[in-house]
Amino acid sequence: MKRQLIITLLLMLSANIFAQIQFENGYYISNSNQKITGLIKNIDWKSNPTEFEFKKNIESAPEIIDIKSAKEFGLSDARYIRFTVKIDRSTDDIARLKKGSAPVFKKETLFLKEIVSGKACLYLYVDSNTKRFFYTTEKMNITSLIYKRYLNHNRDMLTNDTYKQQLLTSLISDNVSKTDIKKLKYNINKLSSLFYKHNNQTPPGKEKEQKKSGNIPESWFHLNIRPGIDYSSLSISHGTDNADNIDMDSEISFRIGAEAEFVLPFNKNKWSVIVEPVYQLYKTEKPFKNQSVNVDYKSIELSVGARYRMFLSDKSALSLSMSLLKDWDLDSEIKYERYTPYDITTRVNFGFGIGYIYNNRYSLEVKYHTNREVLSDYIFKNTDYKKLSFVIGYRLF
């Protein structure tokens, strides 16, 4: 009961903090060209948004501002501008390519993300099936950079790379050569570098910014050492005779784990996939009906799941995790003194964690494990193995 109360309170606290830190200073420009400042919910949009949540201040209720009501909106790390453009939504999925090199344009009103601003500006539109770049110059309005994969009559895959010819016409200058454009790939890194070069601008020091900011991991892969303690208990029941039920004593034991964390490249690097093998031990003995019951349960437990970070500052964050747990016992058994030992075989269960991360290197986590069946091969025996883990983490790299 106490364990469940602790978990409930921790989750309520994290939900409250999560609600506070999602909104960041921002602005939007109305249709009457009025700039309105306040707080915008920054979800680091993976796809270009059609609306956003806005609050006048931290106490006010959020309102939805859609693309019909805002000409532009921005935060510290993103700016979106409303344009009516001709966009080709032809798929880039190789399995779904169609014949014909000509783009199929449709006029749409979209929020485009500004990638480079200056004499020549580069914009990006992304959704689940489409990635398209647009650009403007001092002499030209917003225009799509044409790129399309297609099949010819022999079903060979070809590419319409008209965007190169467009840029040859628009961006050739003392800074940009024909060679720069002819070898140019249709991706954000190559295109933005070309636009910065044309504008005679120094690209932002992305790598330096990432290393200075605790909010953005320095790499996409981390390895963490995670020792700690487990507070475990076990209850055993018999399906036909309650008199054989027994609650074993709760025990504190040492655990050691190594966690591989794969940071996902969206939503400001807040999401990651985690894989953690752990050595765990539960050993206890208890008198029962003029005999003793001995539990010797040691195993390698594999945890696979996801973690979400909620940043409190540049150096600190709360984390929430959920994982699926699979257990491999190491010659474990439950032994009644007068009977043949029961071999431990387990079923999968789940783990839920809440933690604190400091300086993207040190961490503390409380992890609650749902009940685990440890005698799954025995029809008339039911078991509930319960565990609460307290884990200290240190990131090696």
Image (cartoon, grey):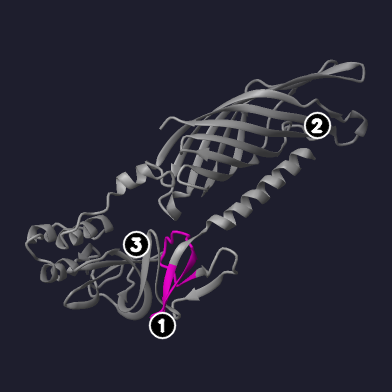
Q: Which labelled disc corresponds to residue 313? A: none
User: Magenta residues, as a range?
Assistant: 27-52
Q: Can you tell which of label 2 and label 1 is closer to the viewer? A: 1
Depth check, front residue: 94 or 354: 354
Marks 3/1 in contact by CB < 8 Å: the verdict is no
Is disc 1 placed on a helix, strand or loop? loop
- In the rendered view of the protein, which quadrant contains the N terminus? top right
Packing grade of label 2 (10 A; few <14, some 14-19, many >=20) is some
Q: Which labelled disc corresponds to residue 93? A: 3
Q: Amino acid at mark 3?
A: Asp
Measured along the vertical axis of the image, is residue 58 above or below residue 352? below
Is disc 3 placed on a helix, strand or loop? loop
Q: Amino acid at mark 1?
A: Asn
Residue 78 visible, this angle: yes
Q: Amino acid at mark 2?
A: Ser
Q: Can you tell which of label 2 and label 3 is closer to the viewer? A: 2
Q: Which labelled disc corresponds to residue 31? A: 1
Measuring from the top left, give residue 291's x and y in whole percent: 88, 16
Measured along the vertical axis of the image, is residue 324 above or below residue 287? below
Packing grade of label 3 (10 A; few <14, some 14-19, many >=20) is few
Quote the CA–CA distance across marks 2 and 3.
53 Å
- In the rendered view of the protein, which quadrant contains the C terminus? top left
The disc, 2 or 1, on the residue closer to the chain's N-terminal end is 1
The disc, 2 or 3, on the residue closer to the chain's N-terminal end is 3
Measuring from the top left, give residue 114's x and y in whole percent: 31, 66
Side of 113 relative to 313 (left or right): left
Mark 2, residue position:
235
Quote the CA–CA distance across marks 3 and 1.
37 Å
Depth check, front residue: 215 or 290: 215
Dividing the picture into quarters, in which one does residue 101 lie? Answer: bottom left
Q: Can you tell which of label 3 and label 1 is closer to the viewer? A: 1
Measuring from the top left, give residue 110's x and y in whole percent: 38, 75
